[in-house]
Image: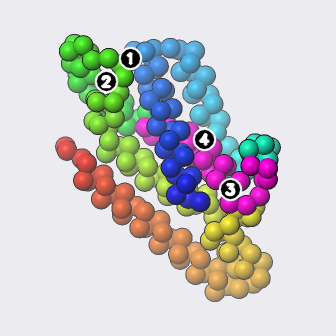
């Protein structure tokens, strides 16, 4: 559930972050209307608490997969909850790229697509991977909440068998496992960032 949601969040958030950057004032394709419209949508989804977003996505889940409960429904809400967040992280990472490098690429006749794929993404890759790590950690936290609405996973186990059944040991163990998962994800993410960071 977390892996698929992370994959979809990156798949949606990466191009969304690129569009936010290149349509911003003074960049490759400035477009105030599109930039502000996307910005509002992204900010709305980022500001809504995840537990409320689950309720918002119930009609969409029923339309797409025929049910609003279970792991597949949780993937939809998890993806919509983290893709806009990841898009902002991508935008921020790419904004750190030296404008001189972009201007040099333009001077050599590079197209906007080439600048994005051969300059912006490679130069900001450490920041993007760091964003993937932060998003993955957020997904682990969100997935625990998804367990409250039959999303499955450790969150459901903690809620059903730990809290509702008064099995304190189960609640404790699932909490420890979630903490360990976050530690492992962060450690792996830091290693990937160091491996691609050329600074």
**Residue 115 image label:** 2
Q: Closer to the observer: label 1 or label 4?
A: 1
Q: How is the image coloured?
A: rainbow
Q: CA distance from mark 3 to mark 2?
A: 37 Å
Q: Residue 2's image quarter? A: bottom right
Q: Name the mark on residue 72.
A: 3
Query: Which x, y percent locates residue 13?
Result: 51, 38
Q: Residue furthest front?
A: 65
Q: Which residues are magenta?
A: 65-90
Q: Quadrant of residue 116?
A: top left
Verify CB contact (< 8 Å) between mark 2 and mark 4. Answer: no
Which residue, given by chain and number where applicable, does mark 1 sit on? Answer: 28
Q: CA distance from mark 1 to mark 4?
A: 25 Å
Q: CA distance from mark 2 to mark 4?
A: 28 Å
Q: Earlier in the sequence, mark 1 or mark 4?
A: 1
Q: In the rendered view, would you say 40 is above or below 135?
A: above
Mark 3 or 2, nearer chain start? 3
Read off the residue under disc 4.
Answer: 46
Mark 4 and mark 1 in contact (Cβ < 8 Å)?
no
Residue 76 covered by magenta stretch: yes
Q: Residues within 10 Å of mark 1 (few under 14, many from 20)?
A: some
Judging depth in this view, the residue of 37 and 58 nearest the camera is: 58
**Considering the numbered disc 1 on the image, is that residue within a helix, a strand or a loop?**
loop
């Amino acid at each position: 559930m977390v892996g698929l949601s992370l994959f979809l969040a990156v798949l949606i958030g990466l191009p969304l972050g690129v569009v936010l950057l290149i349509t911003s004032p003074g960049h490759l394709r400035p477009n105030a209307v599109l930039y502000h419209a996307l910005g509002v949508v992204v900010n709305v989804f980022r500001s809504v608490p995840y537990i409320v977003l689950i309720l918002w996505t119930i009609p969409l889940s029923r339309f797409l997969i025929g049910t609003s409960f279970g792991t597949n429904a949780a993937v939809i809400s998890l993806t919509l909850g983290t893709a806009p967040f990841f898009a902002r992280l991508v935008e921020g990472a790419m904004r750190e790229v030296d404008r001189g490098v972009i201007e040099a690429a333009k001077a050599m006749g590079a197209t906007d697509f080439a600048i994005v794929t051969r300059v912006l993404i490679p130069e900001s890759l450490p920041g993007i991977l760091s964003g993937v790590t932060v998003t993955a950690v957020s997904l682990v936290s969100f997935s625990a909440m998804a367990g409250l609405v039959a999303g499955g996973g450790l969150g459901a186990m903690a809620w059903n068998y730990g809290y509702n059944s008064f099995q304190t040991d189960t609640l404790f163990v699932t909490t420890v496992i979630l903490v360990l998962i976050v530690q492992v994800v962060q450690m792996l993410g830091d290693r990937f960032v160091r491996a691609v960071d050329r600074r």
